[in-house]
Amino acid sequence: MKVCKLAALLFCCMLVLGACKEKKGEVIAKVGNDSITTEDFSERLMSAPPAYQAYINTEPGKKQFIDLLVREKLILESAKQAGINNRTEYKDSIDSFKAEQKKQLKDYEDGLMIEMYLKDVQENVITASEDEINKYYEEHKEDFTNPTAVIAKHILVPTREEAEIAFERINKGESFDKVAQEMSTDKVSALRGGQIGPFRRGELVKEFEEVVFNLKTGEISDIVETPFGLHIITKVSEEKLQPIPEDVAKAEIKGIIEKTKFEKWFEDTKKKLNVSVDYSKLDNMNGTGVEDTTDMQEEPELEEFQN
């Protein structure tokens, strides 16, 4: 019974592993116009699950395995004679599979190129030196020996006009939360009235941090521009934290410096390649081809102005 189950399992595995190619090696079996060679046997053996390879390499295992390959070839030849390969649904499935394989190959090629190039960028462009880490630590020592964590609220909009409208609504007495919920493009924080945090220095983009850490609790900023858009910010609270050990601080600093360097490299490269984006083209797109039900779903966690 155990051998029969093994045979059935191996047969199912073999059905998806065959490929047409020039035959090499000695012929072990013939099935109609096709044959199974020693090379076929070895390659298919390597494709079998490792747990079964030891058994297949025994004398009874080899005989059983070649019988399975013969059975597969017999069914395949019979299918060809029945004209299965001429059916529209068969051809459509093959065309679809080829297109998907072509896309997967392209994605793999692009992904591998990106991975290898980013490794070069990491090693040759953005790696933080010990001198840079030590310099940053000395210049920002207070942030680690006497750190604070801030909770804030913000409204993020793409244009100066929208930022001025939001700012005017708040100045006329509307609640920050209401304006954030209705206008902020940071939909995750908008659900919380624009609230983000707690966060420490070095965790958000520099332009945002320079403002929020200098606000008094409850104070509302002017319009603040960052690479992600225009913000209106208010500080909700500020909490003193325990000192951060120097080795932990320097590990964080390494990340901060390398993120900053990468962003600079990215912006410089955008200019070099004359990158332009027309975001207005996205206004009526949901990317799926189906009805947009975003309002009914939980938003993904994405603080888009973080480093």
Image: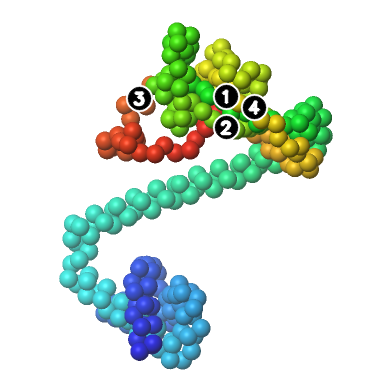
Task: Give, as a three-letter code, the residue at label 3.
Answer: Asp
Q: In the rendered structure, are the residues bearing label 1 and label 2 in contact, judged by CB atoms less than 8 Å apart?
A: yes
Q: In the rendered structure, are the residues bearing label 3 and label 1 in contact, judged by CB atoms less than 8 Å apart?
A: no
Q: Nearer the viewer, residue 166 or 228?
A: 166
> What residue is drawn where x is 32% and y is 36%?
296
Q: Which mark is residue 294?
A: none
Upstream in sequence: badge 2 or badge 4:
2
Q: Nearer the viewer, residue 262 or 136?
A: 136
Task: Give, as a three-letter code, the residue at label 1.
Answer: Val
CA distance for labels 1 and 2? 10 Å
Q: Which mark is residue 197?
A: 2
Q: Secondary structure at mark 2?
A: strand
Upstream in sequence: badge 4 or badge 3:
4
Q: Secondary structure at mark 3?
A: loop
For the residue carrying disc 2, how many other residues have a C-alpha within 10 Å: few (<14), some (14-19), or many (20+)?
some
Query: Does residue 181 appear left or right of residue 50 in this picture?
Result: left
Image location of residue 219, percent across then percent down: 58, 16
Does 189 appear above or below 157? below
> What residue is drawn where x is 39% and y is 21%?
182
Image location of residue 143, percent across then percent down: 74, 30
For the residue carrying disc 1, how many other residues have a C-alpha within 10 Å: few (<14), some (14-19), or many (20+)?
many
Q: Which mark is residue 236?
A: 1
Hey, which residue is sitting farthest bottom in the picture? 59
CA distance for labels 3 and 2? 29 Å
Query: Does residue 143 appear left or right of residue 28 in this picture?
Result: right
Residue located beneath label 4 in the image: 238
Q: Secondary structure at mark 1?
A: strand
Upstream in sequence: badge 1 or badge 2:
2
Image location of residue 30, percent across then percent down: 32, 82
CA distance for labels 1 and 4? 7 Å
Task: Give, as a three-letter code, the residue at label 4.
Answer: Glu
